[in-house]
Image (cartoon, rainbow, N blue to C red):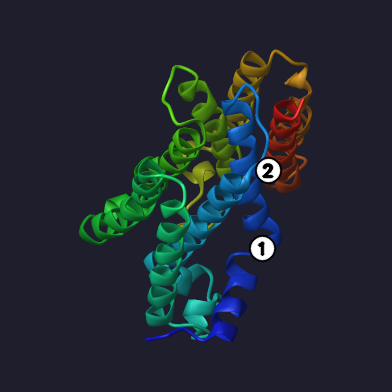
Amino acid sequence: MIVSASRLWSFVLVRFRPEVYVSYGVLWSLALEAVASDHWRPSPATVARAASVVLTLLFLRMLDEQKDLDYDRRHHPDRPLVTGAITSSELRSAMMVCTLCVLALNSLLSVVSLVLATLPLGYGLALAAAERRFPAVRDGVLVSLAASYPVQLLVSCYLYVSSTGAVGWRAVPVVLVFAFAFLHFEFARKTRWLGMAGERLYSLALGPALSGTVTLCWAVAAVVLIVSLTTTWFVVLLVPPVLAARRFLAGTSESWPLPAAMAFVLLSYLSLIAYGLR
């Protein structure tokens, strides 16, 4: 079944907002390249990698929508797949298009890039199959995070190896910077003082205070690595998460202030890009 362009675009505007996800994918690609190389400048290959990352994120978003359908029927009845604004068949067709585009883009770079670019897509599909077979992998928020998180690592590894053409000691701290920054935002968006039974919140699994503390720790870990890699004053990046933690842990905010978490990721990536262009 071929997806209608208008229906797919409507889905993208709601569930893959370009100003958020496209910006995130592009900045992730630029920032990782910038800190991975000693003398970095954007190139046509950078554009291909950034486009590949955005398409990979869209592929995974469409896959998640289908995996979470039953959950969304209970907790998010207004989402496109639940309302019928788009169908699972249409999403699967769009996923095939994304895959072909990722293959085409990376065939222009190298065989290694082509292979590595397919790994996050394949892992996402394998995880979906595992979740159907083992419901605990899908329903437990911490187990689900542990099972799904390697996708993010695979994307970062793809960017590092494709842009540098090598794997060295520097790959570990570089990849971990983006891992910790992502985990900070991931915990921030699912940390609240109150939550309904059955909601996938880290604060329900760990308790609000511990979940908030862990959220802050991910940001601290990311900044420690950024400072060690760049030997700069980027410790100031901790201002948004520290202020957010103060508000949340003091109980003056019912949920972790999400704008602060977004600001932390944005400022971190922009700082790394500026460092690479120095």
Would you say residue 193 is visible in this rendering?
no
Side of 185 where 248 appears, left or right:
right
Q: Nearer the viewer, residue 112 or 58?
A: 112
Q: Is residue 11 above or below residue 119?
A: below
Q: Amino acid at mark 2?
A: Trp
Circle on res. 256 = 2
Tell me the residue at 56%/39% (across/down): 182
Side of 19 where 125 appears, left or right:
left
**x and y percent of residue 215 in the render?**
59, 33
Distance from the alpha carbon under mark 2 to that under mark 1: 23 Å
**x and y percent of residue 93 in the render?**
39, 77
**x and y percent of residue 233 in the render?**
78, 16
Earlier sequence position, callout 2 versus callout 1: 1
Q: Residues within 10 Å of mark 2 (few under 14, many from 20)?
A: many
Q: Which residue is mark 1?
A: 18
SS at mark 2? loop
Q: Amino acid at mark 1?
A: Pro
Image quarter in which the C terminus is found: top right
